Structures are given as structure tokens and as C-alpha cells.
Amino acid sequence: MIHIAICEDNAVHSDQIIKLVHACLRIDFEINTFSSGKAFLDSLSDCRCPYDLILMDIELDDPALSGIALAEKINLMNHRAQIIFISQYLKYVSTVYETEHVYFVNKEEIEIYLPRAIEKALHNLENLQDPFLRFSKSSRQYQIPMNDILFMERKLRETDIHTHSGIFTTREKLTELLPRLSPAFCLCHRSYIVNLNAVVSFDRSNITFTDGQTIPVGRSYYESTKKAFAQMMMKK
């Protein structure tokens, strides 16, 4: 799953962008929309930006907090985030290059160029995928290979990361860890994230791994897990 943010102060344009995103993407995604730069910044916690793809208008409600100013902040928070500028003002074509971004889309040609911009952003995300999961616990920093992970289980206020070589624990929530994982990982239950590459079989009740361990599949997560597994197999 990829996490998308749309920052656009015009409701009509925001709806148009959402429709184009749904028409373009064939993978699971989640969209959050913001009508101002301040609302977007207020949604971020601990100076982290959890979004993979950000579709950004340049002229927002506050002249002091333009889309370009926001992009500069995002570049510092999350170097992986793919930013697509969308504007009707061509005077910004050069200014946007003061930030790291994927594309500048003219609103008058949005139906032609936004799909191309999104395709490029997805290609970049695939090439930028970090092979390690990095996390901390008790002031210590850890990194483990993603392909070594079987699943993650949330227990009370801690998350157990089960790997081929052992179990690691962090206080980070599943929703905080998932955006940093590769597309091979998905929520299969409100308390579990599964690495689909390590799955031998699954049904509506359980997932079985290569080492024989099993974890439950949540009723409301079965269809999304099934879809993610099918998409992964098609890529292979």
C-alpha cells in the first residue's frame, strides 16, 4: 500500500485529482486530503512525513506557506516522498527546482500529464526501496533486512518483529512501521503485519509461513490481503 496526500485549497480541483488517482493506480493506496498548508503540517507528528506520494498545489490559502515552502520541509523529513506540483501558474516552472520533486503538472493539462507523473513517482519509489527496516528501542538503533522478517505482532504497547533469526521488539505501532516497509508487507489483521514473500499458504482464517508458524487473518482484512498477494505473484 502507498500513502498519498493531496494538498489543494480548491475543492473542485481536489475532487478531480482524487478521481484521476483512482483511475491511474492499480495497487492499494490510502488518500488524505488537506485544504491548506497549515492543515498538512499540523497532521505530521515528530517531524515525520509518512506519505509516499504528495500532490501539491503551489498557491495555497496562506502566501507565507506555499506548496514550494511545504516541499522544502518535506524534503528534510522524508527523502523518499515523491512530490508532484500541480498549478495553473506557469511562472513557478523554474522555482519548483529549488526543491526535490518528480513533476510539474499544468492544471489545464492535468488529465494528460498527471497519470504520467504518477507513473514516474511509482517507478522512483520502487527504485528507492530501502532493503532494511530501521527502528529504535530504549535509545538503541536497530536495522534488520526486510526479507528476513516473517510478520509483526502488536501486543499491548509493544510490537514483536518475528524474523528467521529471532524476535525484536519496539514500541512503534504497526501503523508507524507499515509506511517504511516494502509493498510485500500488508496488514492481515488489526494486530498483525505479514511479509507475503514468506507465506506458504493462507485462507480466510490463517496464514502459514515457510517455517510452519501460523497467524490469524482478520475477517475485514482477507480481501485486501488476497489482492496484495495476487499482485505480488503477478510481479514475480
Image (cartoon, helix red, strand yellow):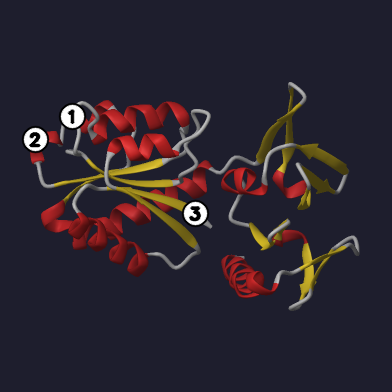
Classify 10 Å Cα crowding around label 3: few (below 14), some (14-19), many (20 and above): some
Say above or below: 101 vs 227: above
**Residue indicated by mark 3:** 2
**Residue indicated by mark 1:** 95
Q: Nearer the viewer, mark 1 or mark 3?
A: 3
Q: Amino acid at mark 1?
A: Thr
Q: Amino acid at mark 2?
A: Lys
Q: Secondary structure at mark 3?
A: strand
In the rendering, at what x and y percent does residue 144 appear?
74, 37
In the rendering, at what x and y percent does residue 191 appear?
73, 56
Classify 10 Å Cα crowding around label 1: few (below 14), some (14-19), many (20 and above): few
Residue situated in front as seen by the camera: 81 or 220: 220
Residue at horizontal 41%, vertical 51%? Answer: 4
Asked if the residue under mark 3 is in contact with the one under mark 2, i.e. CB atoms within 8 Å, the reply is: no
Q: Earlier in the sequence, mark 1 or mark 3?
A: 3
**Residue indicated by mark 2:** 91
In the rendering, at what x and y percent does residue 116 appear?
29, 57
- The image quadrant that residue 231 belongs to is bottom right
Tell me the distance, in whole angstroms, between the alpha carbons under discs 2 and 1: 8 Å
- The image quadrant that residue 214 belongs to is bottom right
In the rendering, at what x and y percent does residue 208 appear?
83, 68
Q: Amino acid at mark 3?
A: Ile
